[in-house]
Amino acid sequence: MQKTFKKIEKSRVVISELMLPSHSNFSGKIHGGYILSLMDQIAFACASKHSGEYCVTASVNTVNFLKPIEIGELVTMKASINYVGNTSMVVGIRVESENIRTGAIKHCNSSFFTMVAKDDTGKSVPVPGIVLENATQVRRFVKSIYRNQMTREGDKALNEKDFSASEYLEELKNYKVIIDESLS
């Protein structure tokens, strides 16, 4: 099997969409679920463009909604491959919104989607490597390595702990909970 490598620029995807009232929640801001759906679509497009295969979302690493998006703003999402494994890719996504009357731009969200390339039978398949051409790309790749390690270590620690209710009853008294007497 011949190993191939692609420049990150070759699979970069940028989309823009005007936010409509139909995209809003009850408080008049753009619904977070709608933004997540767009992010999943651009992650799919970027990963599929890089791999040349159908891709599925394996995980989403930390989605922080930094600033609300208003009806009438133009949302732009930028996606690029930050990291590649054997069959997986980390797609970094930046979400910005622009007030089209004033030109003011705000950073609303950044997130990392892990996508896996699949063949027609649903089997995971190898993806091309990437060519790192500048310090920003190196930084993003290395940060992805560390983010993956921290996730694995955190999952392992949580799975190794018992979390039996009786062990934590005293500690839970410091939180905003009422513990039913039958648990004591």
Image (cartoon, rainbow, N blue to C red):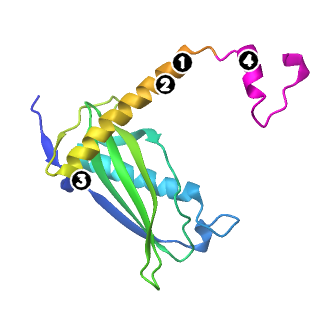
Q: Earlier in the sequence, mark 4 or mark 1?
A: 1
Q: CA distance from mark 4 to mark 3?
A: 48 Å
Give the position of the N terminus as an image quadrant.
Answer: top left
Disc 1 residue crowd, few under 14, some 14–19, many 20+, Cα 10 Å: few
What is the x, y in percent for residue 61?
Answer: 45, 41
Q: Earlier in the sequence, mark 4 or mark 2?
A: 2
What is the x, y in percent for residue 29?
Answer: 61, 67
Magenta-colored span: 163-184
Q: Secondary structure at mark 1?
A: helix
Q: Does 183 appear in magenta?
A: yes
Give the position of the C terminus as an image quadrant.
Answer: top right
Q: Which residue is mark 4?
A: 165
Q: Decide: marks 4, 1 in contact (CB < 8 A)?
A: no
Residue at image position (56%, 73%) is 20
Residue 159's tag is 1
Residue 11's tag is 3
Q: Which residue is mark 2?
A: 155
Q: CA distance from mark 4 to mark 2?
A: 20 Å
Q: Decide: marks 2, 1 in contact (CB < 8 A)?
A: yes
Q: CA distance from mark 2 to mark 1?
A: 6 Å
Task: Report the amino acid beneath label 3.
Answer: Ser
Q: Secondary structure at mark 4?
A: helix
Q: CA distance from mark 3 to mark 1?
A: 36 Å
* Residue 133 sits above or below residue 157 on the image: below
* Residue 5 sits above or below residue 65 on the image: above
> Can the viewer see residue 21 in this picture?
yes
Q: Quadrant of residue 28?
A: bottom right
